[in-house]
Image (cartoon, coloured by chain):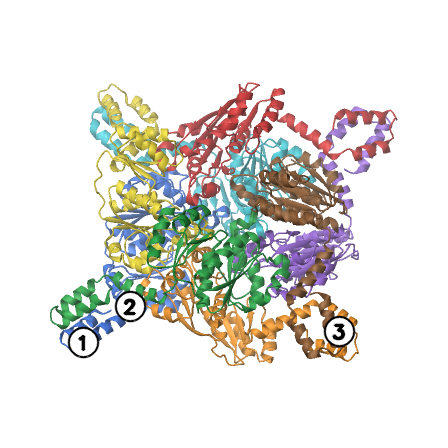
Chain colours: A blue, B yellow, C orange, D green, E brown, F purple, G red, H cyan
Amino acid sequence: MDPTVLKNLLERVGKGDLSVEACLERLKNLPFEDLGFACIDHHRGLRRGVPEVIFGAGKTVPDIVEIVERMAAQGENVLVTRLSGEKAGELKARFPEAEYSERAGALTLISAPLEESGKGTIVVMCAGTSDIPVAEEAAVTARFMGNRVETVYDVGVSGLHRVLAHKERLWRASVIVVAAGMEGALPSVVGGLTDKPVIAVPTSVGYGASFGGIAALLGMLNSCAAGVTVVNIDNGFGAGYAAAVINRG
Amino acid sequence: MDPTVLKNLLERVGKGDLSVEACLERLKNLPFEDLGFACIDHHRGLRRGVPEVIFGAGKTVPDIVEIVERMAAQGENVLVTRLSGEKAGELKARFPEAEYSERAGALTLISAPLEESGKGTIVVMCAGTSDIPVAEEAAVTARFMGNRVETVYDVGVSGLHRVLAHKERLWRASVIVVAAGMEGALPSVVGGLTDKPVIAVPTSVGYGASFGGIAALLGMLNSCAAGVTVVNIDNGFGAGYAAAVINRG
Amino acid sequence: MDPTVLKNLLERVGKGDLSVEACLERLKNLPFEDLGFACIDHHRGLRRGVPEVIFGAGKTVPDIVEIVERMAAQGENVLVTRLSGEKAGELKARFPEAEYSERAGALTLISAPLEESGKGTIVVMCAGTSDIPVAEEAAVTARFMGNRVETVYDVGVSGLHRVLAHKERLWRASVIVVAAGMEGALPSVVGGLTDKPVIAVPTSVGYGASFGGIAALLGMLNSCAAGVTVVNIDNGFGAGYAAAVINRG
Amino acid sequence: MDPTVLKNLLERVGKGDLSVEACLERLKNLPFEDLGFACIDHHRGLRRGVPEVIFGAGKTVPDIVEIVERMAAQGENVLVTRLSGEKAGELKARFPEAEYSERAGALTLISAPLEESGKGTIVVMCAGTSDIPVAEEAAVTARFMGNRVETVYDVGVSGLHRVLAHKERLWRASVIVVAAGMEGALPSVVGGLTDKPVIAVPTSVGYGASFGGIAALLGMLNSCAAGVTVVNIDNGFGAGYAAAVINRG
Amino acid sequence: MDPTVLKNLLERVGKGDLSVEACLERLKNLPFEDLGFACIDHHRGLRRGVPEVIFGAGKTVPDIVEIVERMAAQGENVLVTRLSGEKAGELKARFPEAEYSERAGALTLISAPLEESGKGTIVVMCAGTSDIPVAEEAAVTARFMGNRVETVYDVGVSGLHRVLAHKERLWRASVIVVAAGMEGALPSVVGGLTDKPVIAVPTSVGYGASFGGIAALLGMLNSCAAGVTVVNIDNGFGAGYAAAVINRG
Amino acid sequence: MDPTVLKNLLERVGKGDLSVEACLERLKNLPFEDLGFACIDHHRGLRRGVPEVIFGAGKTVPDIVEIVERMAAQGENVLVTRLSGEKAGELKARFPEAEYSERAGALTLISAPLEESGKGTIVVMCAGTSDIPVAEEAAVTARFMGNRVETVYDVGVSGLHRVLAHKERLWRASVIVVAAGMEGALPSVVGGLTDKPVIAVPTSVGYGASFGGIAALLGMLNSCAAGVTVVNIDNGFGAGYAAAVINRG
Amino acid sequence: MDPTVLKNLLERVGKGDLSVEACLERLKNLPFEDLGFACIDHHRGLRRGVPEVIFGAGKTVPDIVEIVERMAAQGENVLVTRLSGEKAGELKARFPEAEYSERAGALTLISAPLEESGKGTIVVMCAGTSDIPVAEEAAVTARFMGNRVETVYDVGVSGLHRVLAHKERLWRASVIVVAAGMEGALPSVVGGLTDKPVIAVPTSVGYGASFGGIAALLGMLNSCAAGVTVVNIDNGFGAGYAAAVINRG
Amino acid sequence: MDPTVLKNLLERVGKGDLSVEACLERLKNLPFEDLGFACIDHHRGLRRGVPEVIFGAGKTVPDIVEIVERMAAQGENVLVTRLSGEKAGELKARFPEAEYSERAGALTLISAPLEESGKGTIVVMCAGTSDIPVAEEAAVTARFMGNRVETVYDVGVSGLHRVLAHKERLWRASVIVVAAGMEGALPSVVGGLTDKPVIAVPTSVGYGASFGGIAALLGMLNSCAAGVTVVNIDNGFGAGYAAAVINRG
């Protein structure tokens, strides 16, 4: 509810233009949802700087164009995730200043320059090269939300030295996102090397009994390293978002 | 590796007591694991203040007593989780100053007074009264790790007003832990009301197609609210630990 | 069994043209199934006004055309569900007066004008825009069965104010159909806000651990709100049909 | 929010005792949750006559006694479900006027005489004698909510004549609850014989590949009979509740 | 429907005591279920000699006693399956002439001497000694239904010579029942050695990834040997019954 | 082993051309597999008249042509299952006298006229029109193996009268094959109406929680009608084969 | 088949006491299984030194005593696995010289002194102290089969330094058995540190989404380290046995 | 870490060019990962002769070309697995001397002639012709790693004589790889015939309840033959690699 509406009502009561009973009635009938909105607006206010995100999968290009136009018209930054290269091409024809990360499958359109607001660096790791798209989605999301992000890719647990080589980077990180498919063991190893929040993202990379990411998901949920939390399979966006929320703290 | 060992070696080289080749040989043969330990020790140092935690399930009372005694002898605080009331009784007979939370199934023995080191308040919520043991495990763990914790219990999504009644508390929180069984929908609702990190804990509460917590687990992994991460079923300890790690940031 | 056949038999007995024994024998040998049909016909009679529905998936266009022609010839209204736009195009070339809802994937051919026979309004809700096809299938089905239907779309539980904004509509409803994918939490929230029958439809919307609708299905079966019943994944038709049956009461 | 509080505020504005700005501030700070409560209270009012239900499983006898006493003190009727015979004995010692159904595992304490408020008869069926406890829970619940209930037990689909023998009863029913374990086929058969709402309850009766009710649950979700909706495994209470809600319509 | 009722009606029509219309009305209203019963009775007649079977699990001893008494009073043979030794003891105290097979968990009470009516010999095999109870249930059932049964136990596929040693017996058999747990491979091997109907019974024997018989069940359903059909996990009764039905042919 | 080889050896021993020791050595070294073959050949002999069957899925047309040619050259009848219409076209170009059933996806090439060797009639039923391909595969297979087959299609359990209409046919049958998708309840109903062997074939027909035939499979495994056995999902061939084996008895 | 039988037959042919045809007939009728046995006996001979193993679970003490007595009478060494302490006590009363490992749940009775026949050392590792029983079963089995075994316990991947501390031992090993529950990641890490065969044993240790060892099993099957093979959940015996077979090579 | 770096440091300490403290500092800061690399390099050295393997699935041809070029430039042998025929064609255009196995989907480029280093023969078996691609992947991998490989294809357990025909070959083998789909019973049978290590590879061959290889996987994990270990579904590479590692021993 627009506070000015409420203010006007009260002023009219103060002036005697509106009886207490009539005002009471008006307030009673004020749609709950408007108060809801007001509440949410206030809430939104607290969230200032959190840009809108469009889940591109399953939306048509015209749909996406319309949403992006509306947002861009208000000077908002835009992030579109799960966007195929083909759709991205059409969008870039319309918004030439947009940038598309093929690896992340994500397009960003920045009107208001991003400023680093996170309190530290978010490190995004992945176990194999096939996990990179999910990791990149996390990285793009976190950067879009105003964070400094470093990426460490292709450091599977069967080659421990590659993990250990980045130990200091892990110690300096504020939050760590770890994407892994197959057996999904990397978050356990990383979690044991650091005392920072670790967000594990199972990926659907693998075959046979990986069951499209279930093996990795179960591995991460059962991690023997305390402090590891998990998001949905292939949910790079969710991991990057959660990391940004934590890094804001 | 104890740095003094290394220092001694080098001093002997500097003094000519030890040839470069001999020293090289010694260094080569220095067990990798010792360097590993050194590294870990350093790491441990960074973690100072993180007390040891004993997983009580499946351990005998004598086993637990022995570990607690060793730790207490060094002035460390002790947390034992998944401890039955019966075992707790035996432990309290031995350590009268220990405190046991029946609801959490957790025993704490505090030698060094806990000081609040977390940067904000951790709010621990649960959906139904049956979820309280899991929520309490999270709360006890987070408090033990130096955090101020507030609990909000029995606020299921089928009675939204009970959730909404705690909205401001949610906004003031630093991190929120949400335990829920059955359909596990509370984290989605809470995640939509706040911009703080939400750690969801599925509980095994329910019957029939809840499948011992699988329904809640899947619900939480598929949460439509960004920023929600998930731990294992009934893993109150893991949720409290992760919340403490985040709150330290 | 055609009653006239039975009547003729009895008349012949009455006239003495057929002995009791011979008639008895004939009746004994009257195929059970004919009596069955009679019974069903009578039963059908009770259902008068319930039009035939054709499940379009897996049927060829010629098959569907044949069934529709036969039904239309008898002045029956026709509903074809799970019909692709391509097939719909071919059908509309043959039945120009048919109407096709692309969102619902449903085609209707109305010979006898629909009259609202339901006792109240059926509200069809869905959580996200991707759930709309399933919700529309429910809405089209319920309307086709003579019900007034209102739709409320895109009201996910992570934005509670959007749900609450429609609270009064929920209170005025006679039956509520709620379609949701991902964690499927909306029926629990709606069920807690109303005392009307709620039919939950899990949708296959989601990815990763949504497992094609299993997460939503389990969430709904475990709903903490009493009075919620569930139909199969993506079964908008079933939900609309059940809502219509309830609304007839 | 208590309307009188709001009224007082407005009166003070009208009287000039409170400035518009100060009132605005007060209103802004009025806890959302209070408005929520008001809303819920109003909602509760609409539900008047719906008695409280206590889920007995996992609650101690003292817990249940306390809740029952509080409710009985206010003249409310009480239903306790999932109550073992042992606990029921203790409760009856305290509330001698309570009635316990061993088969349903449910205890009722009726202060205000139940009056039949449902618009028709609810028929509760089950397939085998082992399904009776679940069916009885549904029947007790529906009766407790003011409905006339008829029960038809032990009518499995492998003996069709037993089902057919009750056809007319099915036609006269207002709502039908069908509990079945094993392959859970009875709701499909019943659904094909009637045009009334059918609520299917899978039971955990069976062995081997019945998987504690999963086979029956899947069978019911995939019912070829339109108009069948499903509740959780063994959830007789939920089925009876939903039937009562539908029968109120 | 009692034929005499129908006959009376017709006679009254023949005599002119009942008009054709009135009789028609009466016939219309003749309850469907009565015809159903008649039909079933006739069907029962065809089944003459098929004795009643009582599923003992979950029934109390008094319940079983009552059923057995009623059956024995009519001279029927009785088979009680899934009966614990303890319950069997109580039953034998009441029916001293009953025989109890501890291995099969089955009790038989033979009033009318069993006569071998099957057209050939049923061979019941099992893979390991732990599968014997399930195999024995099949054997007892088949014998009870009038079949000559030979048993071949402990012939797992990892010791092929043990299987091959019984090859000629397999060739002489009329029907073969094969019970196996763990990987459930025996039916495939047996099916490849014979051209007789093979009924496979997965048992819940095994641990870990045998998942209570699922591994064996899947193995049998996917048997590379044509002609193998499968019953539920541990369903020795069903296998013996089906074998008897086939052997009757 | 070719018996003539063995005969020659023995003759040479009889003639003194080969010493006992040398023959013993030769026999010892006779490859076990040859004896195996001999055994199998004898076994094959017992099976005379059982034609070869080619699983067409995953084989190339040239592969199939080669096998068919080899078999046809020996005057054997050929059945190719799981054959797409396209492949069938190519095969018919090569073998013009072959017959292809599009519904069954099966091609037969009959050199030696089929003669009915089964002892009775096999009835093949299915629940819905979408189950017909699986049912037809069973029917084609059973006919190919020398059986008289009757088919009864589209008799789902939600329209019981359609099932009951075929009751007498069921009573006259020797073996009954029942294919059904969705909840797979038809075999239970059929099994309750007859005392003949019933082979249930779950089909992958359905959507959502039918999980590609798992719901039907579980329903059939848990059938409350004794005497029902089950084959793999969509395994019409296996059902037809098993029915033929039983009908041979 | 006893070779002397064959020799006698041939001698009689050589002497003319038996015609070629009669001998041929005898040979044809020689039971296949006897040849099978002969073959197996020969095979057994190759395995000399492989002692019998008794799976104790589900066997009664008298059963086990009987088997052990029979074996001991022939001087064979005996291994009984899955033996509870209680049963072990009874067995030791009968066989005082037997040794029981409580941790492994295994009893050994050594008549012929074990000699180390394996070509190298088998290293048995486990991730947590709760995995020790499974690891010990593997170790006891491998030792019983004549292998030198070293054990390395409690080296979870969240404390990498503990794993790395044993690197050289891993390099010296001939075969490595790795038991782990929870996420089952240790085999991947070990597999990456060595080029020796690694046998992974998932244990049922864990809770919640560990699903009794499924998470660990899937993790191991999806190991990113080549050369890792897997046995059933908790199958320490199988792992020790396979390691012994490999070490014999 | 390059040992010369360490040597230089020490020499400078010996010469007094570097103080003990400064050297200590340098050593402290020597990246752990470098030591790690050194260790790994040494480890690599032990593995000399183990060629690199490229997982072709999901990699673009240019990616693969680049990796192959880099490896070939160093004289290394190359194996590319999971390579489609189309991609293989492009690679062969670039590397004409490469060889592609269509059945295995594997390409090899041999610069240094392979020499047989394995201690015995690896036998690779499969149950059906559809399992050949997986078996071939195992065979190609094992040969590439310097092993003599024999293949035995199409020996399903429903035709035991085909398995038995290869018994002697199994006895002569050093390691046996067994690929099988459907019920996956072949490894159990083979394991019972031999005392050699058996590596079982479940394949995704089958339909219906084979669930893409799960049935075979479970069958193999539950094998009643000791000494059988299992790899992931369709993981021919892993089986061949593990067999080679064992054969090296």
| Residue H177, percent from left and from top | 57, 38
* Residue D225 in the image: above or below residue B245: below
Badge 1: few (under 14), some or many (20 or more) residues near its Cα, within 10 Å? some
**On what subunit does the disc labeled 1 rest?**
A
Residue G88 seen in the current view:
yes
* Residue C50 in the image: above or below residue A159: below
Looking at the image, residue G163 sits to the left or right of residue B12; the answer is right
- Residue A19: assigned label: 1
| Residue B145, percent from left and from top | 26, 41
Instruction: Give the amino acid type for the residue marked by disc 1 in the picture.
Output: Ser
Residue B170, by quadrant, is bottom left
| Residue C219, percent from left and from top | 43, 56
| Residue H32, percent from left and from top | 31, 35
Badge 3: few (under 14), some or many (20 or more) residues near its Cα, within 10 Å? many
What residue is drawn where x is 76% and y is 77%? E15
Of circles 2 and 1, which is in front? Answer: 1
Secondary structure under badge 1? loop
* Residue H171 in the image: above or below residue B20: below
- Taking depth in this image into account, of G152 and F249 the one nearest to the observer is F249
Instruction: Give the amino acid type for the residue marked by disc 3 in the picture.
Output: Glu
Q: CA distance from mark 2 to mark 1?
A: 22 Å
Tell me whether circle 3 and circle 1 mark residues in contact (CB < 8 Å).
no
Secondary structure under badge 3? helix
Residue H66 seen in the current view:
no
Q: Quadrant of the N terminus of chain F?
A: top right
- Residue E11: assigned label: 3
Question: Which residue in the structure is indicated by mark 2?
Answer: A32
Q: Point out the tag, 2 or 1, that comes first from the N-terminus.
A: 1
**On what subunit does the disc labeled 3 rest?**
E
Instruction: Give the amino acid type for the residue marked by disc 2 in the picture.
Output: Phe
Residue F158, by quadrant, is bottom right
